[in-house]
Image (spheres, rainbow, N blue to C red):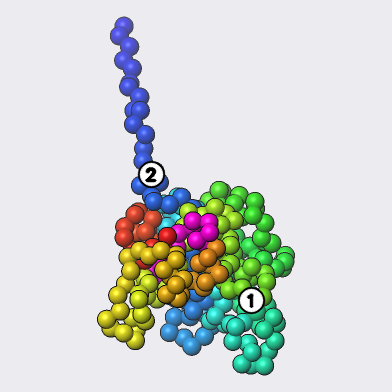
Amino acid sequence: MTTMTKKKNTKRKSTGREKLKYRRILLKLSGEALQGDRRYNIDPTIVDALADEIAQAHRLGIQIAVVIGGGNIFRGASAAALGIDRVTGDMMGMLATVINALALQNGLEHKGVPTRVLTAIEMRQIAELFIKRRAVRHLEKGRIVIFAAGTGNPYFSTDTAAALRANEISADIILKGTKVDGIYDSDPIENADATRFESISFQEVLLRDLKAMDSTATSLCRENSLPILVFDITKSGNIVRILKGETVGTLVR
C-alpha cells in the first residue's frame, strides 16, 4: 500500500501588516473637524465619515489612539473674552473634549470597532481614568483608545496632550488631521502662491512659527524624536495611504 502525504504549505500568509509603515499611531483631530459646515457643535454625518476612515485603518491591524479637541463646543483660551477665568475656561474646554470623544466612540462602535475613552480627569460613570499601562493594554487587545480631557491641567492645549500621550504609549508617529493638505510657508487660503513642504525639521517649524502644532507640543516631539505628519483628514482614504507608506501631507522630523 502506498501512502500519499500532502506537503504542508510552509508559505506564511500575509496579514498585510508587513507592508505597513507604522505599528502604533496617535491621530490628533481638532474639535472643529466634527462640526462640518455648522458654526459649532457636532455634525453626525462628519462623525460617521471620520469613524469610517479610522475603522478602515484599524482593519489593517494597526494600533490606534486618538486625541480630539473641543473647539467646536468651547475653547478655554477664548474664555477671557466672555469674562470667564482662564483656569475655569480651560476646565470647561476639557469637558468639551470628553463630549467629542464620546461622540467619536459611538461612531466607531457603530462600525463594529471596540473603543475605549480614557480621560485625564476622573469621571467613572462616563469613561476610564487614564493610566498608561491600561491604555497600552487596550491597544494591544485591538481596541481604539480615545484620550479625552487634555492633560488634565489648564494652560495646555490638546496638541500638547497629543504629544504627551503619544510619547507615553510609545507611538511611532503623530498624524495630525487638518482641513489642509500639509504645512505651507504661508497661509494657502490667503496666499495662492504658498508653497507646501513635503518634509521639514522641527527646528524650522519652530523658527518660522509655522504652527503645525503648538510650540510646546512641537518641542516635546523634537526632544523625543517623535515625527508628526500633517495631512488632510477630509480626503477619503488618506490614513490608509499614510500607513501603506504613500507620500501624503507634510512630515515633520
Which label lies toward us, 1 or 2?
1
Tag 1: residue type?
A: Tyr
Residue annotated with mark 1? 155
Instruction: Name the secondary structure under disc 1.
Output: loop
* For residue 84, above or below residue 174: below
Res 120 quadrant in image? bottom right
Residue drawn at 61 percent across, 70 percent down: 150
Does residue 149 appear left or right of residue 170 in this picture? right
User: Can residue 58 be found in the magenta stretch?
Assistant: no
Tag 2: residue type?
A: Glu
Q: Earlier in the sequence, mark 1 or mark 2?
A: 2
Question: How would you rate the neighbour count of disc 1 (Cα within 10 Å): few for under 14, some for 14-19, many for 20 or more?
Answer: some
Assign the N terminus to one quadrant of the image: top left
Instruction: Name the secondary structure under disc 2.
Output: helix
Q: Residue furthest left?
A: 193
Tag 1 near tag 2, CB within 8 Å: no
Where does residue 119 sit, x and y in percent of width and height? 65, 65
Residue drawn at 45 percent across, 59 percent down: 227
Question: Magenta region: which residues?
Answer: 221-233
Where does residue 132 sit, x and y in percent of width and height? 64, 54
